[in-house]
Amino acid sequence: MSRATVLGLLLCVANANAAERPNVLFIVADDFRTDLGCYGSHAKTPNLDALAKRGVRFDRAYCQQAVCNPSRSSFLTGRRPDSLHLWVNGTHFRDRNPDVVTLPQWFKQNGYETRCVGKIFHNWHTKEKGDRRSWTADEFLHYANHGDDKPEVAGELPTDIAKGIGRNYGAVPVCECRDVHDEAYFDGRVAAEAGKVLGAVKDKPFFLAVGFWKPHAPFNAPKKYWDLYDRKTLPALDASLPKNATEWAFHDSREILGIPPKQVSPSREQMAEMRHGYLANISYMDAQVGKVLKALDEHKLADRTVIVFVSDHGYHLGEHGLWAKTSCFERDARVPLMIVPPKGKHAGQATSALAELVDLFPTLTDLCGLKSPPGLEGVSLVPVLADPAQSVKSAAFSQHPRPAYPDRTETGQPDAMGYSVRTATARYTEWRDWKSGKLLGAEFYDHRHDPNELSNRANEGPPELKVARRMLLSAFPSDISPSNR
């Protein structure tokens, strides 16, 4: 099937002029693993479940690095972390790539009104370090600290329903349950503003990026979302460490538990509270997505708008003894991804085709009848949208350094980098010395029999099998030698 035929089947936009090109609604969640009802989770996500019925759900989509800035910089430029030379949160992507063209910037250059509501690029805490050149108008609520997301309500807040596990997340507790309205927190205001922007841009081709701050910690969704769950009936936590795993695979979970030696060791009850709070955050965020989609429908834009919903990376909630992100395990690397082409032919279908977040840039240019800029490292997922049984790649690649936040160390450099490849049936990861490239440890998880990655089999089997496993990583799409840094 030719590319032109694929596009014709989906959208009938081939050779369309700019005025006829579809709009893009690009929705990004933060720290959101595949905890959605449509992915088989206990989470209550009616709006995202309904969105999945309108498009194609990708069951094997993967980020390129499981932490905010490297992941977002990667999929918003269509380049991998090694190509951007960006593996940490503290460096703006333009500091090392001043002339790189971003996804919204490319749409802007092609005649689109490009708008940003919420956290899309990493939140560098100051206005000056957004990326204003990507947008037609000023960004809205794109910069802040997650720990500053305190409820904005009139009058005094009651204190008897506030909870916490023993450390603050910035200016707020890690867990907090308050009976306040949705717009008391960032995401409620993001959804309201997105609805206003849709009304303002409805008569022109637009690329609207809506970035929700949740379910990222702190776990402080309004009380009505906590009330959706009975903590006593939540799925049991399996905190087992993978058998025979290298120590390089783990981290100290400092984002949630604090920085050693001043770390909190949560009790069983506190772990249950955090897991409850994460689900509450998910349902709160899902409700805000529903408001944006309702506004899209009310403005009669759905039949000419491509909708994407994605997370920047996954998350751990005590599994493998880990909290938050920054690993190469499946729960951190895998993300929810839904793509809804207008008048798509396969609404409500799921695909097992492997996808990477770097694929989003070329996919959206294809769907909108645009050429792609040079240098993109992903491939278009349009053939999968045309036929969910198809596949466009045989592997997805992720990576992460050790320590997990190397820019916060004395040297500012990693000790090691983990390079990970996910195939249809397995995950293989190598940990390599940052300076010499020496192999420090390896992991192999057979997902056919071990989907939770609880048994590292990298050192099992005859020599030829070990070589075959290592060959999986030989196709890593960037030069992993130290000389490339």
Image (cartoon, grey):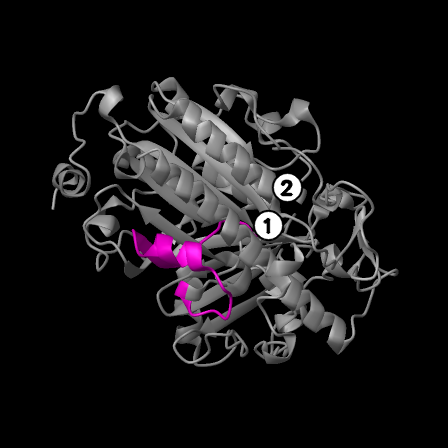
Q: Pointers 2 and 1 in contact (CB under 8 A)?
A: yes
Going from N to C along the chain, the mark reached first, 2 or 1, is: 2
Q: Is residue 182 above or below residue 389?
A: above
Picture quadrant where residue 466 is located: bottom left
On the question of residue 377 being in view, the answer is: no
Residue at the (11%, 46%) spot, across then down: 1
Q: Nearer the viewer, residue 242 or 316?
A: 316
* Secondary structure of the residue carrying numbered label 2: helix
Q: Which residue position holds label 1? A: 214
As for residue 394 lying within the magenta part, the answer is no
CA neighbours of label 1 inside 10 A, class few (<14), some (14 to 19), many (20+): many
Q: Which mark is residue 186?
A: 2
The image position of residue 71, as x and y in percent, is 53, 44
In this picture, residue 366 sits left or right of residue 357: left
The image position of residue 231, as x and y in percent, is 64, 74
Write the start and end of the magenta stretch as one range.
38-67
* Secondary structure of the residue carrying numbered label 1: strand
Residue at the (29%, 46%) spot, across then down: 381
Disc 1 marks a residue whose amino acid type is: Lys
The image position of residue 132, as x and y in percent, is 56, 21
Disc 2 marks a residue whose amino acid type is: Phe
Q: Nearer the viewer, residue 70 or 37?
A: 37
Q: Which mark is residue 304?
A: none
Residue at the (76%, 40%) spot, across then down: 154
As for residue 66 lying within the magenta part, the answer is yes
On the question of residue 192 being in view, the answer is: yes
In this picture, residue 100 sits left or right of residue 375: right
Report the quarter where the C terminus lies. Answer: top right
In this picture, residue 58 sits left or right of residue 392: right
Distance from disc 2 to disc 1, alpha carbons, whole Å, reads 9 Å
